[in-house]
Image: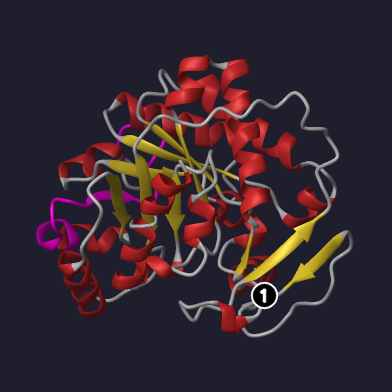
Amino acid sequence: MAMLSTALSGPKSATSYCAPEFSGLRRLCPNNNSNSNSHSQSFLRFSSPRKPLKSVVAMAGTGTFFVGGNWKCNGTKESITKLVSDLNSAKLESDVDVVVAPPFVYIDQVKSSLTDRIEIAAQNSWIGKGGAFTGEISVEQLKDIGCKWVILGHSERRHVIGEDNQFIGKKAAYALSQGLGVIACIGELLEEREAGKTFDVCYQQLKAFADAVPSWDNIVIAYEPVWAIGTGVVATPVQAQEVHVAVRDWLKNNVSAEVASKTRIIYGGSVNGGNCAELAKQEDIDGFLVGGASLKGPEFATIVNSVTCKKVAA
């Protein structure tokens, strides 16, 4: 029980102070005055992964920019009513696929009041058809209330709840077989990054999806380094791009060149209105999976509209 309590307490925010030096890392805290969006951004500079990148070929995706908002276990009927109102009044660029994932108990409220411009995702689903599985939600139930997507493999499901790669892969396969799109999350822990295992961990997680899924047509891959989720510490644009290129290259070599080109690879991990523009300029970052900032309608709209930076960069 103590272990679960520790895991759920989460890391302290890195937005108000510079964390201690980590072994093998160099800390960079940009000057707050240079950030016009008033966000305090923190970056961790890691030494390069131990495996060389010579064999990795940059191959930018061809899919529509995709931004998902993961509301996690947050919100009340009142706060969600306000958030939906803000989203309904926001001006969003037209060439972006936008999805939000409310807590299960509020999905119907959101679906009935949110603009059709934004699709609904669930934060989890069961591995098969519903039945005597206390506390679970079936894909069939999610479709019945209007969900189009489901987030699977999020680090909190992996490292707090204990779901393994194969279990997550089977979940994805069932969701896809029933016509639900999958936001497939991958990403490494801090100690794995420090040990130079970033690529190995991501490849193992990708393989579990590849071994199980019938097709990649309705999958979006979300790379979320676990050390950046909810901490205020963001992978630098170069760090994120490096992994996205490697993921696309893995798809090319292990699935097909067509899948590598068409599959959208989005970034998650303390994305906000102040850092999304620079991240969006990276060739292989096809969008974002947003946590805390997705609970603020205007800021989430800023992140969605960062697609304009992608156009300029192109």
Using residue 33 as the reference point, say whether residue 302 is left or right of it.
left
The residue nearer to you, when weighing 141 against 73, is 73
What residue did someone put label 1 on?
A: 30
Task: Spot the residue most to the left.
Answer: 112
Residue 113 shown in magenta: yes
Give the position of the C terminus as an image quadrant. top left
Q: Position of residue 270 (x, y in %)?
A: 54, 64
Using residue 208 as the reference point, say whether residue 218 is left or right of it.
left
Q: Position of residue 210 (x, y in %)?
A: 53, 23
Q: Position of residue 71 (x, y in %)?
A: 37, 63
Local SS, label 1: loop
Q: Residue at x 32, y 47 (%)?
A: 137
Using residue 85 as the reference point, say whether residue 5 is left or right of it.
right
Q: Position of residue 199 (x, y in %)?
A: 72, 37
Q: Which residues are magenta?
A: 110-131
Using residue 226 as the reference point, say whether residue 63 is left or right of it.
left
The residue nearer to you, when weighing 54 against 76, is 54
Give the position of the N terminus as an image quadrant. bottom right
The residue nearer to you, when weighing 145 against 223, is 223
Q: Quadrant of residue 63?
A: top left
Q: Residue at x 73, y 80 (%)?
A: 18
Kind of residue at badge 1: Pro
What secondary structure characterizes most of the magenta part?
Answer: loop
Q: Is residue 202 visible?
A: yes
Q: Residue at x 48, y 78 (%)?
A: 36
Mark 1 surroundings: few (<14), some (14-19) or many (≥20) residues within 10 A? few
Does 59 appear above or below 93? above
Residue 70 shown in magenta: no
Q: Residue at x 42, y 48 (%)?
A: 312
Q: Is residue 134 visible?
A: no
